[in-house]
Amino acid sequence: MESGLDLPITGVCVVSDPSQCPPNYTVIDKTYDRPEDADLWKDGLFTRRVMRYLCVERQIPSQSQDVLVDVTLINERDQTPAGFAVIDQTRDTKEKATKKKCICVRWMIPSMTNDAITELIFVTRTQRRAPMGYSLVGELNNMSLCFKMGKVPRTGGSGPETQPSGPLSQGSGSSALPYSFNPVAAQGAPPVPPRPPIPGQTSVTRPGVLERTLSRTGGAVHALSGIEWKLNPQYKTLMDLKDVTIPFVRGKTLMEIENEYSYDYTVEQSVSRTATLS
């Protein structure tokens, strides 16, 4: 039986009062390295106390239940990264969740990944590096947000699909995430994501994904919420091409480029002298 901290995170929210943490969620109210308050909101000197705390839900996911695979921080005026959802409201009061920076999360169904985030922690500013086994995300209210990856437990069925081997290499990324969005990569190689659907087949967006995202991020609706992502049909012909011959293009030396594109501005200089004399 796996311990609670080894289970993948299936829900993330922010609350304004630790006592209002949703059922089956765990509130992160203390920093990891020392018992200090993990409040996400930075109060002014003469303003009323405002509190914000991160809450997470962990459980063995069903095949249709998303798991957390990536998290990042952006400035509140920045555009939300593709594939991420921003947590911009508190779950209990529907107020602004964080100040100056926003927490963005990325979800994926278990059949598409072997790994998921199992723990989110905050460490104090004096801790310049992430603890062993964790990856650093960024700084929020003088605390550093870190996460730990773990294996997704299976409730039945086959594991994630893998892309067939081909002539193109996926690259040797250093992230343990299914997709390398976070600038601070985790240890280990990422599992290969499934191949995008061919036009005319089922699109990437699954039924109910909008509802599940809204429930986890406090009900906020964004400009790209619920939009289906699929390949433009005009590129379908490119997938049917065979025996394509790429013509040989000879590289030019620096001297050849200088000779071919040399320009001495004689006309401009002549016009300039004429204008000066007149």
Image: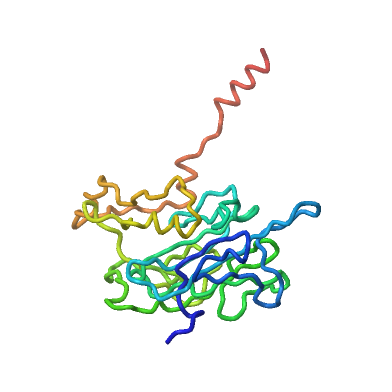
Q: Position of residue 226 (x, y in %)?
A: 38, 50
From the top left corner, tell me how far across and down residue 63 is, in percent. 32, 70
Judged from this view, the residue extending furthest toward the top is 278
Q: How is the image coloured?
A: rainbow
* Residue at figure coordinates x 59%, y 60% from the top left: 15
Total labels drawn:
0
Q: Which quadrant, please, contains the N terminus?
A: bottom left
Q: Compare residues 196 and 14 and report the one nearer the observer.
A: 14
Which residue is at the front of the view, 73 or 194? 73
* Image-based side of 88 in relation to 1, left or right: right
Tell me the residue at 68%/61% (across/down): 141
* In the depicted structure, whether residue 126 falls above or below residue 15: below
| Residue 165 image point, x, y percent | 28, 71
Q: Residue furthest right?
A: 46
Query: Which residue is located at x 46 percent, y 48 percent?
Result: 221
Please give left or right for residue 219 compared with residue 272 in the image: left
Q: Nearer the viewer, residue 67 or 89?
A: 89
Direction bottom: furthest residue? 1
The quadrant of the picture occupied by the C terminus is top right
Q: Is residue 215 above or below residue 149?
A: above
Q: Is residue 270 left or right of residue 190?
A: right
The residue drawn where x is 48% and y is 52% is 219
